[in-house]
Image (spheres, helix red, strand yellow):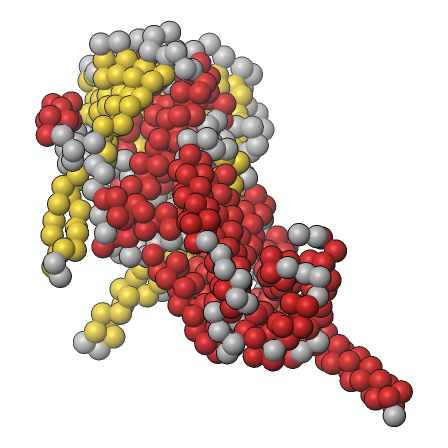
Amino acid sequence: MKADRIKAILNRETYSYFSSPTAYIIIIVFLLIAGWFFSSTIFLIGEATLEGFLTNIPLLFVFLMPAISMKLLAEEYREGTIEILSTQPVNEEEIILGKYLSSIILLIVILAGTLIHPITLSIIGKIDSGRIIGTYIGLFLLGSFYLMVGTFASSLTNTQVVAFIIGFLFCFIFFLLGKIISFFPGAIGFILNFIGTDSHFENITKGVIDTRDIVYYLSFIYLFFLSALYVMKRKRGIKENPSKYLTTVGILILINYFSNYFFIRLDLTKNKIYSLSKVSKKIVKNLNDPVYVKAYFNSNLPGQLLAMRKYLRDILQEFHSYSPRNFKFEFLDPSKDEEISREARREGLYPIQFTEIKKDKYEVKEGYMGMVIFYQDKKEVIPYLKEAETLEYLISSTIKKLTREIKTKIGFLTEHDEKSIPDILKEEIRRNYTLYEDVKIEEKELKPDVDVLLILGPEKEFKEEEIEVIEKFVDSKRNLGLFLSKYKVPLDSFWGSKNNTKLTPFLKKFGIELKDGLICEPPPYCQRIGIQQRRAFFLIQNIIEYPLFPIISNFKKGNPIVRGLEKVTLPFVSPIEISTGTKKGITIEPFMFTTKYSWIRKNTSNLNPLQNIIPNKNDERGPFIVGVTIKKKDAGRIVFIPSGNFASERFQEDVANSTLLLNIIDWLSEDEDLISIRSKGIEYYPLKKVSDTVRLIVKYSNMFLMPFVFLIIGFIWWRKERIKRKIYGELKV
């Protein structure tokens, strides 16, 4: 093959594309549909994400790519020009490659037309640029794959419509395989998952460039290139030995197989979600004795669950690479050996249930997907692995738990109507600490005695001697987490009243006061909630944005408590005021703030979400402080957040809120290593507050601007070609 010949065909085909209206129609229709996908969800989601656009583009490509490539060879067959090409000094490989690369040029132009979407997001919000880059790499590879499939389909026939149908069917099969793996458990599901485009496309668009996915795309592109070449040669009467192509297929299978053992992963995400953090590397490097991990995974699990096995193997291998001597692991398959299944049960694992379709009916089966981590004579059982994003934290925190000699004692104060956190969060605390759920103040002391005391949203009055015990606790160099609302607001009535706990004088001693009123944030900086409303005989569920549930995303850089966090929700929170006359030896550091659009609502009685909650002219505007750390010389640490509901079970179900609470516990325990890992998977990129006019401009410009640009370009090109043909016609006469 010669580059100049390929370039000549490439130039000819590219010119052919852009000198006909078909290319412009395809581009304009695609950009209109893609623009609608993006515009219809951008303000509904309220975050700077391409999710609405990205969810539908793979299916759109199934139709688009065969439409672009259907003419590449079919048109040459129909018009008989393939014979003319054959007389030229070019071979079949150069013809196919030149034509294919011209369709790639068109794909690049189409993707360039969609860049208006991430550019818009970067203007009205903040984006994860690494994930955006990954998204476009994924779209390019997927489009390139489907274009080669379409090129192969075009080689089979001399009719463009037939070529489109064949190309569409092939692309749709590859698209569909990743969607139906739940119907095929075990090895079949695993193979279908590998062949389908879903998992490979999803990996790259998450911002992870994995050589295994690159090898997959290049292998199938080359496979369909060879198939098109074989068909084209057969049509020209050139006999080819099929064994040559079968050998190539075998080599490609081997390359993909070994790529699972020799691969490189590049994590482009902002917080490096899918690669080991410095903390994890430090933990595993500092091991004094070996850690041994036994992962129990059934091979007959549905395909989507087997993807977790792949990711777990990757991350365990990464841990092993940083400490080959002291970190080892193995995978065991209970479905192949009953003794392994019994061993898993003895270790404390239990099988999960999953549904399999067999003989036209659903069957419930059991399988294992857990692991046991051993260190010295201790072990920790993780019975069920749920999310890939939390695996690093799960493994690192377990190693810390097993290697820690003395555990910090964490206690929740009770008997003042304090809030309760979910059981799953209590279990998470127990992973690293000794937890006491029922700490009381009796006989002027805490029982049982703890190192860190948490007071979660009390609503009963504290006695004077109880407050003295808390003061004595802090003065004895032990640490306190206080979550205290100024107002009590039951969520069944939304009717507020003063919360008189008598803890205000305690806070004043540290230079902290709470202003009257509750903080409100306008959309999109507030939480959506569901409210039931009765209309005649019907109950209607309304989803509304509630300003009194502000989303906090403004954090102090460098503060370990909020390191890596993107947002938290603080319901019914009041603003903190720091006294100018703070006593010497006390250091107060604010670490959470509202936006400049927030305001203080003075009416704290009727807080019905269905009313129109907007700022008055004289309302005080933000930003306001909503979280502080307090350090007193020769005393303990204090974290204060003026929202008791933040710590309640309902709001701790939000992973961001529970992460903040766990981070606070780590900071109060003076064990900050795990904070950065825990926050890695939490992403929040809110859009800026914009006017209704700007919203309309954003929506319609993203839907119509680029199609209009290509319409103008197409018109100019058409006029230019028309003039050229006219001049050529006159010269000919």
Q: In the image, what residue occupies the spot 16% across and 29% down?
A: 349
In which quadrant will I find the C terminus? bottom right
Q: Position of residue 674 (x, y in %)?
A: 41, 24
Give x and y (percent) for residue 17: 66, 72
Identity of the residue furthest to the bottom in this view: 733
Query: Which quarter of the picture shows residue 618?
Result: bottom right
The answer to whether 276 is drawn above or below residue 530 in the figure is above
- In the depicted structure, whether residue 284 falls above or below residue 725: above
Q: Is residue 98 left or right of residue 208?
A: right
The picture places residue 20, in percent across and down from the top left corner, at 67, 78
Q: Is residue 549 visible from the viewing direction of this image?
A: no
* Residue at the image point whose x is 54% and y is 47% from the top: 134
Q: Closer to the camera, 104 or 92?
A: 92
Camera-side residue: 69 or 490?
69
Relative image position of residue 29 (x, y in whole percent):
56, 74
Residue 74, image quadrant:
bottom right
- Who's the residue at 65% across and 79% down the image? 21
The residue at the point 58 percent across, 47 percent down is: 133
Q: Is residue 141 in view from this perspective? A: yes
